[in-house]
Image (cartoon, rainbow, N blue to C red):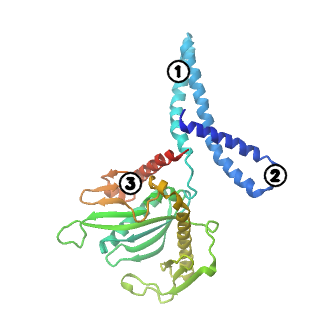
Amino acid sequence: MEKWISKLDSVVERYKDIEGLLSDPEVINDQERFQRLSKKYAELREIVLKYEEYQELQDNIAEAEEVLEIAEDEEMIQLAKMQLAEAEPRLEVLKEKLPLMLIPKDPNDEKNVIVEIRGSAGGDEANIFAGNLYRMYTRYAEKQGWKVEVMNSSPSEMGGFKEVIFIIEGKGAYSKLKYESGVHRVQRVPETESSGRVHTSTSTVAVLPEAEDVDIEINNNDLKIDTYRSSGPGGQSVNTTDSAVRITHEPTGLVVSCQDEKSQHKNKDKAMRILRARLKEKIEKEQQAEVAEKRKSQIGTGGRSERIRTYNFPQGRVSDHRINLTSHQLESILDGELDEVIEALITADQIEKLKQVD
């Protein structure tokens, strides 16, 4: 018997246990527990219904095969063959789907994301590449029907960004983009290179799930808020008022600055959204430290220090080093056609996580 079948039997048992608890007056009177169990019951119900469908299809196939063994009536034989032709493909689909449903869901998957891109090694070329990555993600978001809003940016004099932070709002944004965190490397001849020599530069990408007020509680007494005049490339003053905001979370030392809006209030709101997301990430990383070894074997979300992908312009090639994926669609990928890469990463991650299902 497949390992996941026994796991599904356990899920059915748990589902029935919760069903009984939800009719218990003591549980009903404890609203917090009742709501928690109701949520779990709804999650398990989807799996249980699919498993029941799987078992029903197995019975139908066994019944049809038995008919084919003993039947002499041509009409009965044809009906049994039709039953098999309908049931067998559906069973194969469920065989693939059911184990994936056992993978614990990432509670952040449906959240919006805050993306931070910074030029790293390579000076001006790294900043220009950061601009290329920003365009790639905004184009991808547009194709998904998601909304993009810049939270803070520091444009580079030669083009691109020293740093750009933006939010992507859309259902399932984190589930798709969480694999983009890490070091992105570009190999190409910079426009400023007269000898035609290929340079290697890098930009870092961090993808954080947006944290809501209920996720992270921030004490205002822990915040130091400074205001100053925003500046553009080269340090020239952009605004004549102190609209830029810098927030320091003193217990952790996290610092967030926002200056893109002319309104101090709007800059403060954006800075708080970034701070909340960074605090959430910090807390979750600390909680996950104990299972770090296990996570090393997974695709995960990639550390910011990890080189995850190379964009090679002379060869028109994109290579994702985590899953040994190579694509020669460099231009279309940089134009936001990321589906092939992201789907491959999701599949690889699911395969690794399936190995962890007890």
Mark 2 surroundings: few (<14), some (14-19) or many (≥20) residues within 10 A: few
Viewer-proximal residue among 310 and 133 = 310
State the residue position of label 2.
26
State the CA–CA distance, disc 1 to disc 3.
45 Å
Q: Give the vertical position of 217 relative to 172 (above or below).
A: below
The numbered disc on residue 225 is none
Mark 3 surroundings: few (<14), some (14-19) or many (≥20) residues within 10 A: some
Q: Is residue 177 visible?
A: no
Pointers 2 and 1 in contact (CB under 8 A)? no
The disc, 3 or 2, on the residue closer to the chain's N-terminal end is 2
The disc, 2 or 1, on the residue closer to the chain's N-terminal end is 2
Mark 1 surroundings: few (<14), some (14-19) or many (≥20) residues within 10 A: some
Q: Can residue 33 be seen in this view?
A: yes
Location of the C terminus (image quadrant): top right
The numbered disc on residue 322 is 3
Q: Give the vertical position of 101 relative to 195 (above or below).
A: above
State the residue position of label 1.
81
